[in-house]
């Protein structure tokens, strides 16, 4: 979109990269600024496959949502959703079930700006501008209460976002707060940057230095988010290995191992 920042609300800071806009860059979107593209260029110096990593994350989102639909989930809370793009949660879910309901939550004001157009065309979808670190506020939001029935199973999605929470922000406690609010049969879906190589550790340093967030956790730490829930097969694995639609290589590249993910069921 270039740097035509005058067209966006004043709350949008175009002098610093944002999580949502940087993700838009690696998805080859147009809703980003030069500062976001410069940040991604720095990450690409240590992980040249970073654009592929974004594609792997988008692909597992589709596979995960389809699985949850097959498991009977009809409503989804997509936390830290980022900017709307192709094959978003509601596209996948409503293809499987036209009555599926989706609430996107993100703290980037550009997400809400796009969300207004989304709301106009889809009565079963809403966008809430809020910080996922405040579960009580989000769960009490009128849009969430309108579309999400907390007496029925919910797909709680934290896809590519928990790594932007520092350890002292208690990400596990935040996950547990959402899962305590939803009934048995609900599913937890997490993907997360993984401390899986020296390149990953180098990328973590750049994320923390340039963006201020980006904690690359070990497979064991990522698996810990699912403690107390029934982890579905194949467990917490590199994204391309999670229920792939086609063959995957015997040896995974740095980029293919950069993020791990999994889904668990609340009993």
Image (spheres, rainbow, N blue to C red):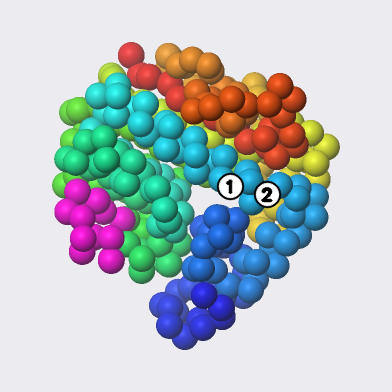
Residue 16 appears in the picture as rendered: yes
Image check: 53 left or right of 118?
right
**Is residue 152 shown in magenta?**
no
Instruction: List x then y, in percent, for residue 8.
Output: 43, 78
Q: Which residue is mark 1?
A: 54
> Residue 29 versus residue 180: which sits nearer the camera?
29
Look at the numbered disc 1 and give the secondary structure of its residue. helix
Tags 1 and 2 touching, CB below 8 Å: yes
In the picture, the disc for residue 63 is: none
* Residue 227 rendering spot, x and y as whole percentages: 50, 18
Which residue is pictured at 52% across the width and 75% down the height? 1
Near-viewer residue (84 or 161): 84
Q: Residue at x 50, y 81 (%)?
A: 5
Can see residue 19?
no
Position of residue 41 relative to residue 168, above or below, is: below
Name the residue that disc number 2 marks.
Answer: 50
Report the magenta residues as a range: 116-127
Q: Position of residue 261 (x, y in %)?
A: 55, 30
């Amino acid at each position: 979109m270039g740097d035509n920042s005058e067209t966006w609300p004043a709350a949008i800071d175009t002098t610093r990269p944002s999580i949502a806009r940087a993700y838009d860059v690696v998805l080859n979107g147009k809703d980003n600024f030069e500062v976001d593209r410069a940040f991604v260029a720095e990450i690409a110096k240590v992980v040249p496959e970073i654009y592929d990593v974004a594609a792997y994350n988008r692909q597992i989102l589709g596979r995960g949502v389809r699985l949850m639909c097959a498991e009977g989930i009809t409503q989804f809370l997509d936390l830290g959703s980022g900017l709307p793009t192709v094959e978003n949660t509601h596209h996948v879910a409503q293809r499987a079930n036209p009555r599926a309901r989706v609430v996107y939550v993100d703290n980037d004001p550009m997400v809400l700006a796009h969300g207004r157009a989304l709301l106009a065309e889809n009565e079963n979808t809403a966008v809430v501008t809020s910080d996922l670190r405040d579960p009580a506020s989000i769960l009490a939001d009128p849009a969430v209460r309108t579309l999400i029935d907390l007496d029925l199973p919910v797909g709680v999605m934290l896809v590519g976002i928990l790594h932007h929470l520092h350890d002292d922000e208690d990400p596990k406690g935040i996950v547990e707060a959402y899962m305590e609010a939803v009934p048995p049969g609900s599913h937890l879906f997490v993907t997360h940057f993984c401390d899986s190589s020296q390149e990953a550790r180098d990328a973590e340093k750049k994320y923390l230095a340039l963006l201020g967030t980006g904690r690359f956790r070990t497979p064991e730490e990522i698996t810990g988010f699912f403690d107390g829930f029934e982890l579905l097969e194949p467990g917490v694995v590199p994204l391309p290995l999670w229920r792939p639609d086609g063959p995957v290589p015997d040896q995974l590249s740095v980029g293919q191992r950069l993020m791990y993910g999994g889904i668990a069921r609340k009993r």
